[in-house]
Amino acid sequence: AKRARAPARVIVTQPRRIAATSAAIRVAYELGESPGLSVGFHVRLERRPPTFDSSIEFVTTGVLLRRLLGGFSKALEGVTHIVVDEVHERDREIDLLLGVLRDLLVQRKEAADLPNTKIIVMSATLDSDAFSGYFGNCPVISVPSKTLYPVVEYFLEDVQNIIAPERKPQRKAPKKSVKDSWGHRTVNDWKTTVVDPVERALMEEKVITGEALRSENRDDISVIVRETKGEKKVSRESDSYDLALCKIMSELVVNLVRSSRVPLAGSNGGAILCFLPGWDEIQTVKKRIFQLLPGASGSGTSFGAPLLSIHILHSAIPHLQQREVFSPVPASSVKLILATSIAETSITIDDVTVVIDSGRIRESNWHAASRMTSLDVTYASLARATQRIGRAGRVREGVCYRLYSRSFRSVLRGAEVPEILRCSLEGLALLAVGVTEGYRIPSKGLIARLMDPPDASRVARAVEQLETIDAIERSDDGGVQLESMSALGLHLARLPVEPVVGRMLILGVLLKAVDAAITIAACLSTQDFLSALPTRPETMTVVQNSLSGTSDVLALVKVYEDWLGSSEIERLSGKDPASRFFISEGALRLVSRLREQLQFALYRQGFFGGGGGSADSTPASLNTHGDDENVRCALICAGTLGNIAHRVGADGIELLTKGVSNARVHPTSVVSDGVGFGGGAAGGTPFS
């Protein structure tokens, strides 16, 4: 800026809210100021823009994309640099933004009105050749990256010697056992916790490549979990595998704290950062630690060793609560942070000296045949493993414990499959229409030019779906088929849900059932409600009969509303609706957080009008029909457009869908017996 004698205005994108805000606060601190002067941030639900002429603004990827809906010239006026950080994550918004910026670089050679903004793509673990090639073989600047202090890495076979040192090895141990500076025995071939068929095959000189394992789905490494009565072998393919990992992680945490193996962070207490797949696993570890520490209560517990302060870092918890993880603890305490992949990148928690990596993540996958998205637990990539170990070693030497074996590391994929190849495309296509509007660029053309473009037929179906719900309009401009956003589409693009669900929210306002619509939308956006199935079929029948007999979604809404009205005593005693109906309390808490976000989004867009509503409550005038079950059923049908099944046959169990002629209702559904929506007669049933 000094050389050019002109202000420099820099926008830095981050994939998550907490990353954008924490980076802004840290940079402002380094400059000796508070956010809002030369450094600012803009994330969903919160904004503190910079006020100086030369400035840095940290924003989420989605915020910048939505700014571009108004056109390049307006959104990037005065912007000299755009830094797209953490591009290795390759989520759909990052990929779309990269495609938009690449088109901007091409177009501005021919259009004088477009800004001359410099683009910088950045990550500690990116494939520089691939990204350079995508941007026309642009220059690559490599900065050697390493943690400030060395980090010692351990694997699951080493963890055995910490959580169960008294157990005898299953195989002969070396004569001498070497101890490192942490007091851990480093006996590489003493594997009493892990029985690894991959390693066994290699020992038998069978060549098994990582690619072959993935293509054949041969990832059935088993673990042995120590229990009170012997040992239990658990397959990685079973639902109990992650529960086994939670038990091992809990025992490891308690052992490290009790034996004072958590290094201090300077004059403050050290912190343990645990990476887990999701909310349920976080709650399982937290409860397990309290069980292992009798008398534990609140966020800390004393047991003769340092005080343990537990914090949760998850995208669904309030932003202010997320920031609590940055607060240091006294030297007499240990901070435990139970986090998802949200803690992998762009945030620095200074006092983390220990990382425990479960090696697992939750990943969304789109199934075109059923038009449904599933949230699956799978293995984290090597790129994520590198990011996770980098969270330690910031203030002194650190240590990282991997809850998988050394040999399994060799078959981990290098990076995740880009999200754009495994997600629903309606929301992405809508944003693509918005950012290309006015530049005579077909949205399908933009998506086809992304780094890893999805199949053209999927993009075409997504655009057709947007036309069906009146979110976009087509026009012919000199033989070029162009799309533009409708007024409805502009609102849908600004809602944090898929377009068809956003349309249902707006219909909820029009039908005066906005609270019900918000709850239904939150339920449709949440998965894994069941905490456990009853052991006896007749128990499930009782549960089904006590809920809605016409809809699984209505049943979930009823459970949520009853749970919301239950007392804390009922929840602790297991007498609340979540416990009675085998519903995960974690899932219900996620629904509650999503409701808050959706309600604020509707309020911010002016849908509450002058009816007395606020960001925290909806107006009574928009809820006069909220308890009408027919209205709720209509909203569900609107929110599951395209997923309508026609019931056929006398029993009403067989379904005819758009792609399948012999579908059947899942046994856990409240309508699995064919009763409901007409008492067994043929009719339409939404599924989601």
Image: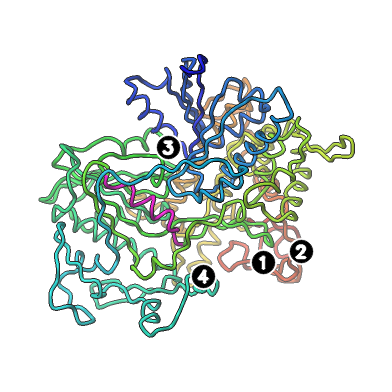
Q: Is residue 298 shown to the viewer in this render?
A: no
Q: Looking at the picture, which amino acid does disc 1 mark?
A: Gly
Query: In the picture, residue 196 is in which quadrant?
Result: bottom left
Residue tagged by mark 3?
19
- Find the distance from the CA under tag 3 to the CA under tag 4: 33 Å
Does residue 339 appear to the left or right of 533 in the view shown?
A: left
Q: Position of residue 394 (x, y in %)?
A: 27, 42
Q: Earlier in the sequence, mark 2 or mark 4?
A: 4
Calculate the distance from the C-alpha at mark 3 to the C-alpha at mark 1.
Answer: 48 Å
- Which numbered disc flags the more N-terminal residue, 2 or 3? 3
User: Reading the chain from its start, which is encountered first: label 4 or label 1?
Assistant: 4
Q: Position of residue 55 (x, y in %)?
A: 47, 21
At mark 2, the secondary structure is loop
- What residue does disc 2 label? 682
Q: Is residue 676 visible?
A: yes
Which disc number belongs to residue 211? 4
- Residue at the (58%, 49%) spot, across then down: 524
Q: Nearer the viewer, residue 684 or 245?
A: 245
Residue bearing mark 1: 674
- Sequence-first tag of 3 and 4: 3
Question: Residue 279 or 397: which is nearer the viewer?
Answer: 397
Q: Report crowding for label 4: few under 14, some 14 to 19, many 20 or more residues within 10 A (C-alpha).
A: few
Report the amino acid beneath label 2.
Ala
Residue span colored magenta: 379-393
Q: Is residue 348 above or below residue 4?
A: below
Q: Can you tell which quarter of the image residue 435 is in? A: top right
- Is residue 672 magenta-colored? no
- Count residues near mark 3 (Cα–Cα under 10 Å), then give few for <14, some for 14-19, many for 20+: many
Please, which residue is most extreme toward the bottom here? 204
